[in-house]
Image (tube, coloured by chain):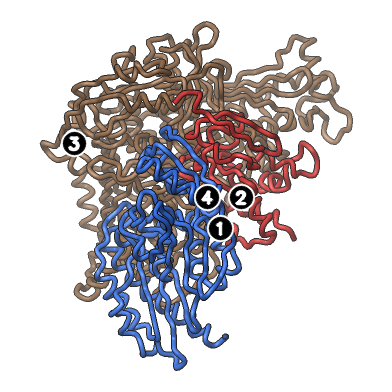
Amino acid sequence: MVAAPFRYQRAASFEEAVAALAEHGEDAKLLAGGQSLVPMLNLRVARPEWLIDLNPVGAGPVAEAGGVLRLPALTRHRVLESDGLVRRRCPLLAEAASLVGNVRTRARGTIGGSLAHADPAGELPLAALTLGAEVSVLGPAGARDLLVDELLISYLTTALAPDEVITEVRVPAPRPRQGWSFLELTRRTSDWMVAGAAALVELDERGTVAAASLAFGGVAERPVAAPAELLGGLYGEPPAEQRFARVADLAAATLRPEDDVHASGTYRRRVAGVLGRRALNQAAIRARASGETP
Amino acid sequence: MTDGDKQRVSFTVNGEAREAWVFPHESLLDVLRDAGCHEVRYGCGEGVCGTCTVLLDGEPVSACLLFAVQAEGCSLLTVRGLAQGAAQPGEPHPLQASFLRNGAAQCGFCTPGMLLTAWALLRREPHPTRERIRRELCGNLCRCTGYSKILDAIEDCRQP
Amino acid sequence: MTETTVPTREGYRIVGRSPAHHDFADKVAGSLLYAADWQLPGMLHGKVVRAQVPSARITAMDVSAARALPGVVAVLTAADVPWNQIVEHASGGLGELAVAMPVLAADRVRYQGEPVALIAAVSPQAAEEAAELIDVDYQDLPGVFEVEAALEPGAPLVHDEGNLLVTWNIGGDAAEVDAAMAAADLVVEGAYRTQRVEHAYLEPEAGVGWVETGGIITLRVATQVIEHAGAIAAILGLPANQVRVISSYMGGGFGGKEDMTVEPYLALLVWHTRRPVRLVFERQESLLATTKRHPFVMRYRTGVRRDGTIVAQDVDIVGDAGAYPYLSARVLFAACVCASGPYRVPMVRHRARAVFTNTPPTSAFRGFGAMQVTFAYEQQLDRVAAALGLDPVAVRERNFLAKGDAIPTGERLDTAVAVGECVRRALDALGEPPRPSGPGRRVGRGFAANMQPYGRTMWFRDRAACWLSLEADGSLQLRSGVTDLGGGQAASLAQIVSEILGVPLGEIGVHIGDTALTPPAGGTFATRQLYMSGNAALAAARELRARLLPVAAALLGTAEDDLVFEDGMVRPPGGSRGLRLAELAAACHQRGVPTSHLGTWYAPTGAFDPASGQGSSFPDYTFGAHAADVEVDLETGQTRVLSYAAAHDVGRAINPLRVEGQIQGGAYQGIGYALGEEIVLADGNATSTLLANYLMPNAVDLPDVRVVVLESGEGKGPFGARGIGEPSIANAAATIANAVAAATGARVTQLPITPERLLGALDALAVETDTVEGGPHAS
């Protein structure tokens, strides 16, 4: 087993990477953590002519400013799962990162790489979508910002132009009385999810639901958010498992997952509903707990 | 590709400086094996099985998912470097001794990767629970032992 | 010759202890050289080019571009193979369809992944590129991918000779069995399906070959069977002594390195290029195309009396042989013999057939046919218990085989049958039943007993040899053709020899697995090496000891019977004076007494009559039982194994730590088989060849396996040992299926027990309990 030959260029900055992409066009691929790309190269499923290595760019520390957590694109999963700030201020993301692959995957994999790879069964795209995260993107024409919801298009497909690179991921900091949950069902621990659900639930001072978000992974060509009008039905009501179940089941019923080697689409849809309910419920419980211990 | 496309890469393996001329598409795994580090093993090329685990600047990585050119300037540790941490020259490292004592290897093919992953964990967290050790090892597959004796050996080596 | 008195159990010096052996220390140090680790000057890199379709005619093949590629030294096709056949006589001439297995497909492809060409190049990169340049034109032919379809009249033929490879019948005729069923108080019917799985040893198939002095084609490969040297020589058109096979210590085998893997291809490339060649199968290639475990379709009818006594059992088994025979005939024989398990059944009818399909060949895999049937017969008995309202343990206790009982072949068991004790001890080891971890979750306990043969079928007239040499310095050389899968096959021989000759383990040089230099041991499979080579080593050690004794007795002025061999010395009992083995060796030299000895051990043999289904099957059986607590998530169908225990009567544990390891490892593979592992094909095409998609359990997915080692002392191996390599894998699937049924009432009869399948069974159960009333003939 050996990858097909390619030319290799180290990029010391995002600007250098963009310049290289602009020069080589679609014949070039960016290499970040490489935990998804390199198996494809080894198996000769992907055969770029150029590999532009982003790793020399490096990642500065995770920072919080203006109610936003700022994550350099090359922040590795290992940092996401263990960094004190991320664990405290964005536990959903830390939890999602801890479920990615194995220790070696997490030692190398990066958040920018995960989002750009856009695996529909990936943990980080699901987490980023649920959190309402935003990415900064650099291209030859300059920088632009995209919501993750706008970034993710389909299976291994994003809104990035061939000469664009993600430079930063920004996640809104949690609100008071907000709880979270990230659940996935895998056939084997550490594998790709058969289905996943992530949720945020915010309670008001009376303890009724003020806001909620829910998204599913592994059940469509990209992670999908539950329709806002469904979640809206929860607002102003006390958190109750039956209501969560109804919302999750209705949301899951809109999904049309495909069959694969690990599960049928029918099973995935059914389990998405179960996980959705559990996620909303767990998020509400955590929201209540966070309200009790400010 | 001709030899002119080769690039020079230098790194250390178990503290020893190494230099090689490699094609960009050559994996770190293949380059290490060609250099005589046969204890780093091919098992899948997907980063799944863990037999090619090496520590790259202290972190366990899959050598099959890194190109050798990416290891420029890095320090690599294989299982044969582990014994450098033994009390006496020629003695096994305490973790290796614990594997021997607990019968934690059968065919031995996964053993170097297991040892390195476990060692990296113990260095970061000297008192992991059995469940914690399980999670950390879930990317190192073993087909012979059922893992119990491997877990026993690592627990047996936790700092008191 | 003086027969050494077998030491009492307490009297053992080294048997029953667990020293860390030579190979073990090397493995933990990382210094052991596996098959792919060998490097030679000027070595080429081999590659096998494989068919991409499951059933086709090859209409044209163009290798000219590949041959012309710089760096490519050889491209070989069927036309370049002197004798394009792999020979296998798996049924020993007892009625198997004769079908040729080509080394390289010439005009017909019968499974996806079948080898069609070979490449040797100066680099792996050049070999890859050459493979991409080989142009094969396939004309698709109708294929057949499931055994039921293959048995239909008019089904597409995998081989012109037919789709039915072999049929085995054991027991009475249909009318007698039907009469017994009619007289039964209850007949439980069940249908069970098992899946295609992969050995998935961590070490892919690999080897290095070169030409030795004298033109000897020499292969150092990961193989369980160096005796394939003869078949390799035949393919090359050479005399058998012109091919030498050396086995490296393997990174696991489990039966997957019992048939030839890289050997014929490697040999052809070496023979053709006259240069050293390395050939390593890629993992994805191994998943795609190497041999697998047989999927079984099993139909059972079990007739019982009201008290749970079995009166009759009717079993029909169809095993999927894949596209070529390999060892399928023998696997289905083992299934046919063991189909009723460790139970007394007065009236049986077992039929087992192996059927060709256009899928990767199936062959040996730990458990070897005796495994799949456990999934069926142990669920049948739980169903009997449920239908009669009896305790499942009580039902088994009413029917367990005992020493002296006949099994379906008519043979009487002549060693201990501790299966009942195994069941009790495994259940006891689980402790208190757990409680569900939350709402919507149920827990349940299940168990399964089994019997698994060790040793080859008796009509193969098995034997093994071992050659010992006492060196001038008192150290010992042990030479044996044994191959070592990683289970300590070589190390246990050293331990046995050390017990008899008193040479410390560290002073025994162990040389194994070389057709040129070690005496034949017959391959490591069928859980036969402790039995066969263990007995050979024991015989060789005793015979050598007997030869040394008179010399030692004369020198020490003591009676022979009083002498003790220990710590590298020969001593009178209790005496401090003694003779160092080096001194004894020197004295032997002086007196012209040889200090080396070749011992050969012949296993008892027998005959089997395929017409009556009666006769000799296997030398002996190992009995055991596993038990587990599981928790099922009723909403997702996920099953988590909470605790697991395994008990086997191993006769005598030569190295208890290794025995425990074998049992834990077998249970682990069995749990993977029960819950996750499957090679999924769609019309003969692999759905995935990624290891990432092959769900063998990792460290998180398994509980610790608690092991109970029973030692009846009545095995037929050395010191009363029984084989334990294979037996521990068989119980897990039925154990877990029974535990799931105990937890939920839902019974999954198809492996693996996926969350989705279990959810389906739970749904069906809900429907059934709503609408159907149970009758006395429950199924």
Q: Which residue is located at x 60 percent, y 68 percent?
A: A84
**Label 1 crowding class (10 Å Cα cut-off): few <14, some 14-19, many 20+?**
many
Nearest the camera: A20 or C403? A20
Q: Of discs 2 and 3, which sits in the foreground?
A: 2
In the rendered view, would you say C589 is above or below C374? above
**x%, y% of residue A187?**
40, 57
| Secondary element at tag 2 | strand
Q: Which chain is blue?
A: A
Subunit that carries the residue with mark 2:
B
Say which label, 1 or 4, has the lower sequence index: 4
Chain letter, colour red in render: B
Q: Distance of mark 1 from mark 4, alpha carbons?
A: 22 Å
Say the numbered circle drawn on residue B59: 2
Residue B23 in the image: state x and y as whole percent.
50, 30
B20 and C154: which is toward the camera: B20
Mark 1 or 3: in front is 1
Question: Is disc 1 in the same subunit as disc 3?
Answer: no
Provide the secondary structure element on which disc 4 rests.
Answer: loop
Residue found farthest to the front: A141
